[in-house]
Image (cartoon, helix red, strand yellow):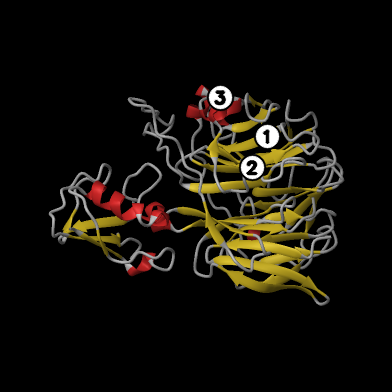
Protein backbone atom coordinates (compact mmCIF):
# COMPACT_ATOMS: atom_id res chain seq x y z
CA UNK A 1 0.00 0.00 0.00
CA UNK A 2 1.46 3.32 -1.03
CA UNK A 3 2.24 5.91 1.64
CA UNK A 4 3.58 8.55 -0.75
CA UNK A 5 2.09 10.54 -3.56
CA UNK A 6 3.58 13.15 -5.88
CA UNK A 7 1.44 16.12 -6.88
CA UNK A 8 2.63 18.06 -9.94
CA UNK A 9 1.27 21.60 -10.05
CA UNK A 10 1.50 24.93 -11.84
CA UNK A 11 3.78 26.16 -9.07
CA UNK A 12 5.82 23.20 -7.97
CA UNK A 13 6.00 19.54 -7.03
CA UNK A 14 4.45 18.60 -3.71
CA UNK A 15 5.05 15.30 -1.94
CA UNK A 16 2.23 13.86 0.15
CA UNK A 17 3.09 11.40 2.92
CA UNK A 18 0.64 9.12 4.69
CA UNK A 19 1.18 9.17 8.45
CA UNK A 20 -0.79 7.92 11.42
CA UNK A 21 -3.16 10.86 11.20
CA UNK A 22 -3.64 10.68 7.46
CA UNK A 23 -2.18 12.33 4.38
CA UNK A 24 -0.31 15.62 4.59
CA UNK A 25 1.85 17.75 2.34
CA UNK A 26 5.35 16.86 3.49
CA UNK A 27 7.67 18.62 1.05
CA UNK A 28 7.76 21.02 -1.88
CA UNK A 29 10.24 21.16 -4.75
CA UNK A 30 10.61 23.51 -7.71
CA UNK A 31 8.41 26.04 -5.92
CA UNK A 32 7.25 28.67 -8.37
CA UNK A 33 7.98 26.53 -11.42
CA UNK A 34 5.49 24.79 -13.66
CA UNK A 35 5.76 21.03 -12.99
CA UNK A 36 3.54 19.28 -15.49
CA UNK A 37 4.20 15.61 -14.69
CA UNK A 38 6.26 13.42 -12.38
CA UNK A 39 7.25 9.79 -12.85
CA UNK A 40 8.24 7.40 -10.09
CA UNK A 41 10.10 4.51 -11.70
CA UNK A 42 9.37 1.43 -9.57
CA UNK A 43 12.31 -0.47 -11.04
CA UNK A 44 15.03 2.07 -10.28
CA UNK A 45 13.37 4.21 -7.63
CA UNK A 46 14.17 7.30 -9.72
CA UNK A 47 11.88 10.27 -9.86
CA UNK A 48 11.68 12.20 -13.12
CA UNK A 49 9.89 15.56 -13.13
CA UNK A 50 8.86 17.43 -16.27
CA UNK A 51 9.00 21.20 -16.02
CA UNK A 52 7.69 23.69 -18.54
CA UNK A 53 9.39 27.01 -18.00
CA UNK A 54 7.52 28.74 -20.79
CA UNK A 55 10.18 31.28 -21.80
CA UNK A 56 13.00 28.79 -21.30
CA UNK A 57 11.35 25.64 -22.63
CA UNK A 58 10.61 22.14 -21.38
CA UNK A 59 13.13 20.49 -19.06
CA UNK A 60 13.44 17.17 -17.25
CA UNK A 61 14.95 16.73 -13.80
CA UNK A 62 15.79 13.45 -12.06
CA UNK A 63 16.15 12.58 -8.39
CA UNK A 64 17.84 9.41 -7.17
CA UNK A 65 17.32 10.08 -3.47
CA UNK A 66 13.55 10.24 -3.20
CA UNK A 67 13.33 13.90 -4.13
CA UNK A 68 15.92 15.35 -1.75
CA UNK A 69 18.12 16.52 -4.62
CA UNK A 70 17.52 16.92 -8.34
CA UNK A 71 19.69 17.13 -11.45
CA UNK A 72 18.62 18.35 -14.86
CA UNK A 73 18.79 15.60 -17.48
CA UNK A 74 18.30 15.57 -21.22
CA UNK A 75 14.95 16.54 -22.66
CA UNK A 76 13.58 14.73 -25.71
CA UNK A 77 14.77 16.34 -28.91
CA UNK A 78 13.11 16.04 -32.29
CA UNK A 79 15.27 15.28 -35.32
CA UNK A 80 15.81 17.86 -38.02
CA UNK A 81 13.10 18.00 -40.64
CA UNK A 82 14.20 16.58 -43.97
CA UNK A 83 14.98 19.30 -46.50
CA UNK A 84 11.89 20.43 -48.35
CA UNK A 85 9.55 18.51 -46.10
CA UNK A 86 6.62 20.66 -45.01
CA UNK A 87 3.98 18.64 -43.18
CA UNK A 88 0.64 20.29 -42.52
CA UNK A 89 -1.88 19.72 -39.78
CA UNK A 90 -5.18 18.54 -41.22
CA UNK A 91 -7.33 21.15 -39.45
CA UNK A 92 -5.34 24.37 -39.36
CA UNK A 93 -3.19 23.62 -42.42
CA UNK A 94 -0.14 25.06 -40.72
CA UNK A 95 3.25 23.35 -40.62
CA UNK A 96 3.92 21.07 -37.68
CA UNK A 97 7.01 22.14 -35.81
CA UNK A 98 9.39 19.34 -35.00
CA UNK A 99 10.05 20.88 -31.64
CA UNK A 100 9.21 19.85 -28.08
CA UNK A 101 6.21 21.70 -26.69
CA UNK A 102 5.18 19.56 -23.72
CA UNK A 103 6.07 16.31 -21.98
CA UNK A 104 2.64 14.75 -21.70
CA UNK A 105 3.36 11.16 -20.63
CA UNK A 106 6.13 9.45 -18.69
CA UNK A 107 6.00 5.73 -18.01
CA UNK A 108 8.58 3.16 -16.94
CA UNK A 109 9.43 0.20 -19.14
CA UNK A 110 8.50 -3.30 -18.12
CA UNK A 111 10.14 -5.99 -16.06
CA UNK A 112 13.59 -6.80 -17.35
CA UNK A 113 14.00 -3.34 -18.85
CA UNK A 114 15.92 -1.41 -16.20
CA UNK A 115 16.46 2.18 -17.22
CA UNK A 116 13.76 2.23 -19.87
CA UNK A 117 11.41 5.20 -19.80
CA UNK A 118 8.78 6.02 -22.41
CA UNK A 119 7.84 9.63 -22.98
CA UNK A 120 4.88 11.04 -24.91
CA UNK A 121 4.98 14.63 -26.09
CA UNK A 122 3.31 17.42 -27.95
CA UNK A 123 3.53 17.49 -30.92
CA UNK A 124 2.75 13.79 -31.21
CA UNK A 125 6.14 12.30 -30.45
CA UNK A 126 6.88 9.06 -28.64
CA UNK A 127 10.39 8.97 -27.20
CA UNK A 128 12.25 6.18 -25.42
CA UNK A 129 15.20 6.34 -23.10
CA UNK A 130 17.26 3.25 -22.34
CA UNK A 131 19.43 5.02 -19.77
CA UNK A 132 17.00 6.45 -17.21
CA UNK A 133 16.62 9.70 -19.10
CA UNK A 134 20.22 10.54 -19.89
CA UNK A 135 19.33 10.39 -23.60
CA UNK A 136 16.18 10.01 -25.68
CA UNK A 137 15.33 8.66 -29.10
CA UNK A 138 12.22 9.45 -31.12
CA UNK A 139 10.30 6.35 -32.17
CA UNK A 140 10.55 6.80 -35.92
CA UNK A 141 8.16 4.05 -37.03
CA UNK A 142 5.25 5.80 -35.32
CA UNK A 143 6.46 9.30 -36.19
CA UNK A 144 6.95 8.34 -39.84
CA UNK A 145 3.56 6.63 -40.19
CA UNK A 146 1.55 8.65 -42.76
CA UNK A 147 -1.46 8.53 -40.46
CA UNK A 148 0.51 10.37 -37.78
CA UNK A 149 0.47 13.47 -39.95
CA UNK A 150 -3.31 13.39 -39.83
CA UNK A 151 -3.40 13.70 -36.06
CA UNK A 152 -4.76 17.02 -34.80
CA UNK A 153 -4.93 18.89 -31.53
CA UNK A 154 -7.73 18.40 -29.02
CA UNK A 155 -7.45 20.93 -26.23
CA UNK A 156 -4.01 21.98 -27.45
CA UNK A 157 -3.04 23.44 -30.81
CA UNK A 158 -1.05 20.34 -31.70
CA UNK A 159 -1.70 16.62 -31.20
CA UNK A 160 -0.05 14.81 -28.35
CA UNK A 161 0.58 11.43 -26.75
CA UNK A 162 -0.73 11.47 -23.19
CA UNK A 163 -1.10 7.77 -22.35
CA UNK A 164 1.45 4.95 -22.51
CA UNK A 165 0.53 1.45 -21.32
CA UNK A 166 3.31 -1.15 -21.17
CA UNK A 167 1.85 -4.65 -21.01
CA UNK A 168 2.94 -6.32 -17.75
CA UNK A 169 3.14 -9.67 -19.59
CA UNK A 170 5.42 -8.44 -22.38
CA UNK A 171 7.24 -5.11 -22.33
CA UNK A 172 7.43 -5.10 -26.14
CA UNK A 173 3.64 -4.78 -26.20
CA UNK A 174 2.90 -1.07 -25.75
CA UNK A 175 -0.21 1.00 -26.33
CA UNK A 176 -0.40 4.77 -26.59
CA UNK A 177 -3.35 7.15 -26.46
CA UNK A 178 -3.34 10.19 -28.73
CA UNK A 179 -5.41 13.38 -28.69
CA UNK A 180 -6.48 13.35 -31.42
CA UNK A 181 -5.33 10.20 -33.09
CA UNK A 182 -6.96 7.26 -31.30
CA UNK A 183 -5.10 4.36 -29.69
CA UNK A 184 -2.02 2.78 -31.24
CA UNK A 185 -0.43 -0.58 -30.45
CA UNK A 186 2.96 -2.14 -30.99
CA UNK A 187 3.77 -5.74 -30.17
CA UNK A 188 7.42 -5.61 -31.17
CA UNK A 189 8.82 -2.89 -28.96
CA UNK A 190 7.93 -0.07 -31.32
CA UNK A 191 9.17 -1.37 -34.67
CA UNK A 192 5.65 -1.56 -36.11
CA UNK A 193 2.44 0.12 -35.01
CA UNK A 194 -1.24 -0.48 -35.68
CA UNK A 195 -4.13 1.83 -34.93
CA UNK A 196 -6.49 0.10 -32.51
CA UNK A 197 -9.48 2.35 -31.95
CA UNK A 198 -12.18 0.35 -33.71
CA UNK A 199 -15.57 1.06 -32.17
CA UNK A 200 -14.75 4.48 -30.81
CA UNK A 201 -17.05 7.32 -31.81
CA UNK A 202 -16.08 10.95 -32.23
CA UNK A 203 -19.16 13.12 -31.76
CA UNK A 204 -17.20 16.20 -32.78
CA UNK A 205 -16.70 14.98 -36.37
CA UNK A 206 -19.15 15.02 -39.31
CA UNK A 207 -21.47 12.00 -39.25
CA UNK A 208 -19.67 9.99 -41.92
CA UNK A 209 -16.34 10.39 -40.14
CA UNK A 210 -17.35 9.75 -36.55
CA UNK A 211 -16.11 6.16 -36.45
CA UNK A 212 -12.78 6.78 -38.17
CA UNK A 213 -10.14 5.45 -35.84
CA UNK A 214 -7.51 8.11 -36.39
CA UNK A 215 -9.75 11.04 -35.39
CA UNK A 216 -10.66 9.71 -31.95
CA UNK A 217 -9.92 11.77 -28.86
CA UNK A 218 -9.20 9.46 -25.95
CA UNK A 219 -8.55 11.75 -23.00
CA UNK A 220 -6.82 8.94 -21.13
CA UNK A 221 -6.13 5.24 -21.72
CA UNK A 222 -5.77 2.95 -18.69
CA UNK A 223 -4.88 -0.74 -18.56
CA UNK A 224 -5.73 -3.25 -15.84
CA UNK A 225 -2.47 -4.57 -14.45
CA UNK A 226 -3.73 -8.07 -13.67
CA UNK A 227 -5.92 -8.35 -16.79
CA UNK A 228 -4.00 -6.34 -19.40
CA UNK A 229 -6.44 -7.13 -22.19
CA UNK A 230 -8.98 -4.99 -20.35
CA UNK A 231 -8.52 -1.32 -21.12
CA UNK A 232 -10.63 1.70 -20.28
CA UNK A 233 -10.77 5.04 -22.04
CA UNK A 234 -12.23 8.29 -20.88
CA UNK A 235 -12.93 9.78 -24.28
CA UNK A 236 -13.92 13.30 -25.22
CA UNK A 237 -17.52 12.27 -25.66
CA UNK A 238 -17.91 9.14 -23.62
CA UNK A 239 -16.43 6.17 -21.86
CA UNK A 240 -15.15 3.20 -23.86
CA UNK A 241 -13.95 -0.22 -22.78
CA UNK A 242 -12.04 -3.00 -24.48
CA UNK A 243 -11.76 -6.59 -23.28
CA UNK A 244 -9.68 -7.83 -26.18
CA UNK A 245 -6.50 -5.82 -25.88
CA UNK A 246 -7.84 -2.81 -27.81
CA UNK A 247 -8.82 -4.87 -30.87
CA UNK A 248 -12.33 -3.46 -30.39
CA UNK A 249 -14.01 -0.90 -28.16
CA UNK A 250 -17.52 -0.64 -26.74
CA UNK A 251 -19.12 2.63 -25.70
CA UNK A 252 -20.85 2.62 -22.33
CA UNK A 253 -24.13 4.48 -22.45
CA UNK A 254 -26.50 6.11 -19.99
CA UNK A 255 -23.87 7.37 -17.57
CA UNK A 256 -24.93 10.06 -15.12
CA UNK A 257 -24.30 12.83 -14.27
CA UNK A 258 -22.06 12.93 -17.35
CA UNK A 259 -19.89 10.75 -19.53
CA UNK A 260 -17.51 13.68 -20.13
CA UNK A 261 -14.30 13.96 -18.20
CA UNK A 262 -10.57 13.57 -18.42
CA UNK A 263 -9.16 10.93 -16.04
CA UNK A 264 -9.78 7.24 -15.56
CA UNK A 265 -8.17 4.88 -13.08
CA UNK A 266 -8.52 1.11 -13.16
CA UNK A 267 -8.27 -1.25 -10.19
CA UNK A 268 -4.97 -3.12 -10.58
CA UNK A 269 -6.49 -6.48 -9.61
CA UNK A 270 -10.12 -6.11 -10.70
CA UNK A 271 -10.68 -5.22 -14.35
CA UNK A 272 -14.36 -4.49 -13.69
CA UNK A 273 -13.62 -1.66 -11.26
CA UNK A 274 -12.75 1.78 -12.60
CA UNK A 275 -13.09 5.36 -11.42
CA UNK A 276 -13.95 8.51 -13.38
CA UNK A 277 -14.47 12.18 -12.54
CA UNK A 278 -17.38 13.47 -14.63
CA UNK A 279 -17.76 17.06 -15.74
CA UNK A 280 -20.05 19.25 -17.78
CA UNK A 281 -19.38 18.58 -21.44
CA UNK A 282 -17.51 19.91 -23.10
CA UNK A 283 -16.99 23.58 -23.68
CA UNK A 284 -17.71 24.50 -20.05
CA UNK A 285 -15.67 21.89 -18.19
CA UNK A 286 -16.62 22.06 -14.55
CA UNK A 287 -18.36 19.63 -12.18
CA UNK A 288 -22.00 19.07 -13.05
CA UNK A 289 -24.11 21.48 -10.96
CA UNK A 290 -20.96 22.58 -9.11
CA UNK A 291 -20.75 19.26 -7.25
CA UNK A 292 -17.49 17.30 -7.26
CA UNK A 293 -18.24 13.58 -7.61
CA UNK A 294 -16.42 10.39 -8.51
CA UNK A 295 -18.12 7.82 -10.69
CA UNK A 296 -17.20 4.23 -9.95
CA UNK A 297 -18.18 1.05 -11.68
CA UNK A 298 -17.59 -2.35 -10.09
CA UNK A 299 -19.36 -4.44 -12.69
CA UNK A 300 -17.39 -3.68 -15.80
CA UNK A 301 -19.41 -0.63 -16.74
CA UNK A 302 -22.91 -2.08 -16.57
CA UNK A 303 -23.65 0.37 -13.77
CA UNK A 304 -21.98 3.34 -12.13
CA UNK A 305 -22.33 4.71 -8.62
CA UNK A 306 -21.83 8.42 -8.04
CA UNK A 307 -19.78 8.99 -4.92
CA UNK A 308 -20.04 12.30 -3.05
CA UNK A 309 -18.90 11.49 0.50
CA UNK A 310 -16.16 13.91 1.53
CA UNK A 311 -16.30 15.92 -1.68
CA UNK A 312 -17.65 19.49 -1.97
CA UNK A 313 -21.25 19.55 -3.09
CA UNK A 314 -21.95 23.19 -3.88
CA UNK A 315 -20.29 26.00 -5.81
CA UNK A 316 -17.31 23.85 -6.66
CA UNK A 317 -15.56 24.32 -9.97
CA UNK A 318 -12.71 21.88 -9.61
CA UNK A 319 -11.75 20.23 -12.87
CA UNK A 320 -9.63 17.10 -12.56
CA UNK A 321 -7.19 16.82 -15.45
CA UNK A 322 -6.36 13.53 -17.16
CA UNK A 323 -3.29 12.70 -15.09
CA UNK A 324 -4.69 14.00 -11.81
CA UNK A 325 -6.39 10.81 -10.59
CA UNK A 326 -4.43 7.75 -9.49
CA UNK A 327 -4.94 4.47 -7.68
CA UNK A 328 -2.24 2.66 -5.75
CA UNK A 329 -1.10 -0.92 -6.30
CA UNK A 330 -3.70 -2.30 -3.85
CA UNK A 331 -6.69 -0.59 -5.41
CA UNK A 332 -7.70 0.78 -2.01
CA UNK A 333 -5.97 4.13 -2.02
CA UNK A 334 -6.82 6.83 -4.52
CA UNK A 335 -5.79 10.45 -4.90
CA UNK A 336 -6.97 13.24 -7.13
CA UNK A 337 -6.18 16.91 -7.56
CA UNK A 338 -8.00 19.75 -9.25
CA UNK A 339 -7.49 22.90 -11.23
CA UNK A 340 -8.39 24.97 -8.18
CA UNK A 341 -5.72 23.39 -6.02
CA UNK A 342 -7.77 20.86 -4.10
CA UNK A 343 -6.32 17.43 -3.35
CA UNK A 344 -8.42 14.60 -2.04
CA UNK A 345 -7.48 11.06 -1.06
CA UNK A 346 -9.45 7.91 -0.36
CA UNK A 347 -8.35 4.94 1.72
CA UNK A 348 -11.41 2.82 1.01
CA UNK A 349 -11.46 2.36 -2.73
CA UNK A 350 -13.27 5.61 -3.34
CA UNK A 351 -16.17 5.09 -0.91
CA UNK A 352 -15.20 8.28 0.89
CA UNK A 353 -12.70 11.08 0.36
CA UNK A 354 -10.65 13.31 2.64
CA UNK A 355 -9.36 16.77 1.80
CA UNK A 356 -5.58 17.03 1.99
CA UNK A 357 -5.42 20.64 0.82
CA UNK A 358 -7.66 23.21 -0.78
CA UNK A 359 -4.89 25.70 -1.35
CA UNK A 360 -2.31 24.16 -3.64
CA UNK A 361 -1.62 25.57 -7.09
CA UNK A 362 -3.59 24.14 -10.03
CA UNK A 363 -2.89 20.40 -10.12
CA UNK A 364 -1.76 18.73 -13.33
CA UNK A 365 -0.91 15.24 -12.13
CA UNK A 366 -0.92 12.97 -9.08
CA UNK A 367 1.10 9.77 -8.93
CA UNK A 368 1.50 7.29 -6.09
CA UNK A 369 4.91 5.89 -5.33
CA UNK A 370 4.31 2.27 -6.30
CA UNK A 371 6.18 -0.96 -5.90
CA UNK A 372 6.94 -2.94 -9.03
CA UNK B 1 35.29 40.66 -29.19
CA UNK B 2 31.52 40.94 -28.70
CA UNK B 3 30.29 40.46 -25.17
CA UNK B 4 27.14 38.52 -24.32
CA UNK B 5 25.04 39.18 -21.24
CA UNK B 6 21.86 37.47 -20.07
CA UNK B 7 18.68 38.32 -18.24
CA UNK B 8 18.87 37.67 -14.51
CA UNK B 9 15.73 35.50 -14.81
CA UNK B 10 17.70 32.76 -16.50
CA UNK B 11 20.35 32.70 -13.80
CA UNK B 12 18.26 30.71 -11.31
CA UNK B 13 18.00 27.90 -13.83
CA UNK B 14 21.46 27.96 -15.30
CA UNK B 15 24.38 30.26 -14.55
CA UNK B 16 25.11 32.58 -17.49
CA UNK B 17 27.87 35.05 -16.65
CA UNK B 18 28.69 37.83 -19.08
CA UNK B 19 31.49 36.74 -21.39
CA UNK B 20 33.36 37.95 -24.41
CA UNK B 21 33.36 35.51 -27.31
CA UNK B 22 34.33 35.49 -30.97
CA UNK B 23 31.84 35.62 -33.82
CA UNK B 24 30.62 37.77 -36.68
CA UNK B 25 26.96 36.73 -36.61
CA UNK B 26 24.63 36.10 -33.70
CA UNK B 27 24.70 32.38 -34.49
CA UNK B 28 28.49 32.32 -34.30
CA UNK B 29 28.53 34.38 -31.12
CA UNK B 30 25.98 32.22 -29.33
CA UNK B 31 27.58 28.98 -30.50
CA UNK B 32 30.88 30.22 -29.10
CA UNK B 33 29.24 31.13 -25.81
CA UNK B 34 27.39 27.82 -25.49
CA UNK B 35 30.50 25.81 -26.29
CA UNK B 36 31.69 26.98 -22.90
CA UNK B 37 28.26 26.65 -21.26
CA UNK B 38 26.34 23.87 -22.99
CA UNK B 39 23.52 23.63 -20.38
CA UNK B 40 22.47 27.20 -21.23
CA UNK B 41 21.85 26.46 -24.91
CA UNK B 42 18.44 24.84 -24.42
CA UNK B 43 17.23 27.73 -22.28
CA UNK B 44 17.83 30.27 -25.05
CA UNK B 45 17.40 28.25 -28.25
CA UNK B 46 14.74 25.64 -28.90
CA UNK B 47 15.52 22.14 -30.13
CA UNK B 48 15.52 23.33 -33.72
CA UNK B 49 18.17 25.95 -33.00
CA UNK B 50 15.81 28.94 -33.24
CA UNK B 51 15.58 31.64 -30.62
CA UNK B 52 12.88 30.50 -28.20
CA UNK B 53 9.49 32.06 -28.86
CA UNK B 54 9.49 34.11 -25.67
CA UNK B 55 13.11 35.15 -25.73
CA UNK B 56 14.52 38.26 -27.37
CA UNK B 57 18.03 39.19 -28.52
CA UNK B 58 19.47 42.68 -28.96
CA UNK B 59 22.74 43.69 -30.61
CA UNK B 60 23.89 47.08 -29.31
CA UNK B 61 20.32 47.79 -28.30
CA UNK B 62 18.78 46.81 -31.64
CA UNK B 63 16.39 43.87 -31.68
CA UNK B 64 17.52 41.21 -34.13
CA UNK B 65 15.68 40.52 -37.38
CA UNK B 66 16.41 36.84 -37.93
CA UNK B 67 15.15 34.76 -35.00
CA UNK B 68 15.42 31.48 -36.92
CA UNK B 69 18.88 31.45 -38.48
CA UNK B 70 20.37 34.12 -36.18
CA UNK B 71 22.16 35.62 -39.16
CA UNK B 72 22.25 39.20 -37.86
CA UNK B 73 25.75 40.64 -37.99
CA UNK B 74 27.58 41.35 -34.75
CA UNK B 75 30.26 44.11 -34.77
CA UNK B 76 33.51 43.29 -33.06
CA UNK B 77 32.87 45.49 -30.01
CA UNK B 78 29.13 44.88 -29.79
CA UNK B 79 27.13 44.05 -26.69
CA UNK B 80 24.61 41.23 -27.17
CA UNK B 81 21.72 41.09 -24.70
CA UNK B 82 19.62 37.94 -24.28
CA UNK B 83 16.39 38.73 -22.43
CA UNK B 84 12.85 37.50 -22.05
CA UNK B 85 10.15 38.89 -24.30
CA UNK B 86 7.58 40.64 -22.19
CA UNK B 87 4.39 38.67 -22.39
CA UNK B 88 1.48 38.13 -20.14
CA UNK B 89 1.27 41.64 -18.69
Q: Which mark is residue A163?
A: 2
Dot 3 and dot 1 within a common chain:
yes
Front residue of A204/A50: it is A50
Spatial CA span between label 3 and label 1:
23 Å
Q: Measured along the vertical axis of the image, is residue A94 above or below residue A14?
A: above
Asked if the residues shown at circle 1 and circle 2 are in contact, with their CB atoms under 8 angstroms apart, the answer is: yes
Q: Nearer the viewer, mark 2 or mark 3?
A: 2
Calculate the distance from the C-alpha at mark 2 to the C-alpha at mark 3.
Answer: 24 Å
Circle 2: element type: strand
Disc 1 secondary structure class = strand
Pinpoint the chain carrying mark 2. Answer: A
The tag earlier along the polypeptide, 1 or 2, is: 2
Q: Position of residue A267 (x, y in %)?
A: 82, 48
Q: Which residue is mark 1?
A: A175
> What residue lies at 37% left-to-right and 33% top-to-bottom?
A95
Q: Residue at x 68, y 34 (%)?
A: A175
- The chain ID associated with circle 3 is A
- In percent of the image, x 81 and y 77: which residue is there? A21
Disc 3 on helix, strand or loop?
helix
Q: Residue A54: percent from the left, percent from the top?
A: 42, 57
Total numbered badges shown on the rendered structure: 3
* Image location of residue A194, percent across then percent down: 64, 24
Which residue is more in the foreground, A195 or A317? A195
Q: Is residue A35 left or right of residue A297?
A: left
Q: Earlier in the sequence, mark 3 or mark 1?
A: 1
Q: Determine which residue is flagged by label 3.
A: A209
Amino acid sequence: MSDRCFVSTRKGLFTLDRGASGWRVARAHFVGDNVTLTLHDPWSGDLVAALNHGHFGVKLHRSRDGGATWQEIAAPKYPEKPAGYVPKTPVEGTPVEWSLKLVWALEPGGAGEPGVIWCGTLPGGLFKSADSGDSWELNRPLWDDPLREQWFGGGADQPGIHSICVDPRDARHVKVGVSCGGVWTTRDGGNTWTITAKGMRAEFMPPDKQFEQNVQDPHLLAQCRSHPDVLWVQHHNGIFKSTDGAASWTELKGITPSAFGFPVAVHPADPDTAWFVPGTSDEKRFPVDGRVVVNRTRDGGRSFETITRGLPQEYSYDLVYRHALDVDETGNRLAMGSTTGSVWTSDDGGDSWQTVSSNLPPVYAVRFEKEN
Amino acid sequence: MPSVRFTRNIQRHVECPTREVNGATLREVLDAYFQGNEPARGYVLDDTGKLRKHMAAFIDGRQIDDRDRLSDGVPAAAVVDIVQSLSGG
